[in-house]
Image (tube, rainbow, N blue to C red):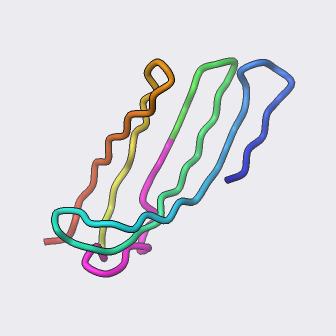
Amino acid sequence: MLGARSEVKGSASYVALERVVGTLEGKAGSFVLQHVGSMARGAMSLSVTVVPDTATGALVGLEGTMTIDIVEGQHHYAFEYALPR
């Protein structure tokens, strides 16, 4: 993860790559998520997507996006994805 902060309060950015290993719909494998986030004077913007062609095992062909909502300091994740049939 790389991050940068400006001198303006609430303005910053980060990028990250995250390898995920697990099971979806009973199919095991791994994939990489790409995070691109920024904050402009407190207004947040975030994109988290599956890096194309990084899925392995039974997850080959996986596509998807993730949202992260922060409520009262707690992170809540939603992963919308499609697996080839």
What stretch of residues is rendered in magenta?
47-60
Quadrant of image for the C terminus: bottom left
Relative side of 37 to 75, left or right: right
Q: Residue at x 34, y 55 (%)?
A: 64
- Between 48 and 28, which is closer to the camera in this rendering? 28
Relative side of 19 to 41, left or right: left
Measured along the vertical axis of the image, is residue 6 above or below residue 20?
Answer: above
Residue 35 in the image, given as x and y percentages of width and height: 55, 50
12 within the magenta span? no
Relative side of 56 to 84, left or right: right
Residue 4 in the image, given as x and y percentages of width and height: 78, 40
Q: Residue at x 16, y 68 (%)?
A: 26
Measured along the vertical axis of the image, is residue 51 above or below residue 54?
Answer: above
59 within the magenta span? yes
Residue 5 in the image, given as x and y percentages of width and height: 79, 33
Q: Residue at x 67, y 53 (%)?
A: 1
Count of numbered circles on the image: 0
Q: Quadrant of residue 54?
A: bottom left
Residue 37 in the image, given as x and y percentages of width and height: 59, 40
Relative side of 7 to 42, left or right: right
Q: Residue at x 58, y 46 (%)?
A: 36
Q: Residue furthest bottom?
A: 57
Q: Residue furthest left?
A: 85
